[in-house]
Amino acid sequence: MTKYIGLYFIPLFFLACQSNVFDQMLRNDQELHKPQPGEWRFEHKENSQSLHDFRQSNFIRPDSKRKNIDLIPIGTFTLNDAQQLSLCCEYLSIFYQIPCRLSTVISDTAIPTKNRRIGTDHQIQLLAPFILDSVLLPQLDSHAFCSMAITTQDLFPKPEWNYVFGLASFTNRVSVSSIYRFRDQPALNQIDNVCLLRLLKTASHETGHMVGLHHCQHAHCVMNGSNSLQELDQIFCRLCSDCLQKLNSNIPLKIEERNIQLLQFFRKNHLETPIQELIPDSIAFAN
Ligand SMILES: [Zn+2]
Ligand SMILES: [Zn+2]
């Protein structure tokens, strides 16, 4: 009988510590403002997702077999683009605490002429659904939990649309995002931190959907929806306590260690705004 005591004691102790961590984080969650016309929450009336809802949803989640995030570059990448992609992969592996694998570049000639067009700024635009269905899905690796294409080319979802930032099929666990409109400066001889931050937010947000997280209504959070680049720039990199708790119920996370690693990543890459978002949590964990 005695030997079973430990089995019950440890999980209860572990759960108590974990909930304490989320309670500490909850105090650092920042309240959302009233949505304004044009903003995501004004234009899309979405229901909030509880922890219970999240646990009940039947999303395929990372497990011992499907444990990688695959990042697939499509298009022509400068040295700096490639560096940003490599940083994005490093970031996702810290953010989700599962391995991220960066694949070799796929040329955009893999998208046939009938599935591309020339946009109003004379730029090449690729048909996003074709990339999901005919490029990513056929080569979805059995060890990949999800496959995310990042392209330097502009995207469009259907002929009547001007462009789209990205497109995803959450049930098929594939998505494509474009950095074409993320770039802040045309001179690409140094890392464009505005572009990098937009890429990190978009990639972590889309992966969040892949694990079953809905748009966050709870606080400022990377899972907030965005309707424009301007709104994307205001979104936090931080996952709020509510979304992190959901994620943790799916992928057990070492919350404090993760926070330290994220801070190290942002400091190393001189990304000041997300550092300010995470410091209150690290102070709370230390006390
Ligand atoms: Zn979203
Ligand atoms: Zn959230």
Image: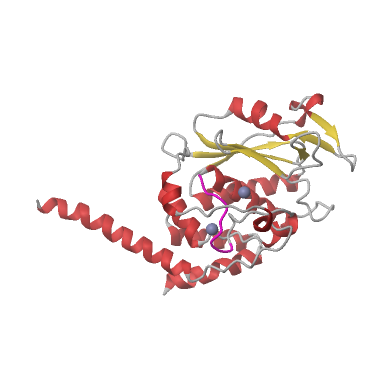
Where residue 213 sits in the image (x, y, percent)?
A: 52, 49
In the depicted structure, whether residue 192 falls above or below residue 163: below
- Residue 278 sits in which quadrant? bottom right
Residue at image position (79%, 56%) is 184
Front one among 184 and 126: 126
Figure quadrant of the C terminus: bottom left
The quadrant where residue 224 appears = bottom right
Q: Where 33 falls versus 154 (above or below)? A: below
Residue 200 % position (x, y) = 64, 52
Viewer-nearest residue: 15 or 77: 15
Direction from residue 24 to residue 218 in the image, left or right: right
Which residue is at the far bottom? 287
Q: Quadrant of ligand 2?
A: bottom right
- Main SS of the magenta segment? loop
What is the magenta range? 212-220
Left or right: residue 115 versus residue 136 is right
Asked whether residue 217 is drawn in magenta, I would say yes
Residue for point 60% across, 28% down? 137
- 133 vs 56, nearest the viewer: 56
Query: Could you tell me which residue is drawn at 52 percent across and 59 percent down?
Result: 261
Taking the image as drawn, is residue 177 in sight?
A: no
| Residue at the left extreme, as displayed | 1
Vertical comparison of 152 with 31: above or below:
above
Residue 164 location, x and y as percent? Answer: 75, 43
Would residue 247 be counted in the magenta stretch?
no
Tell me which residue sits at (75%, 51%) in the image: 182
Residue 230, visible in the rendered structure: yes
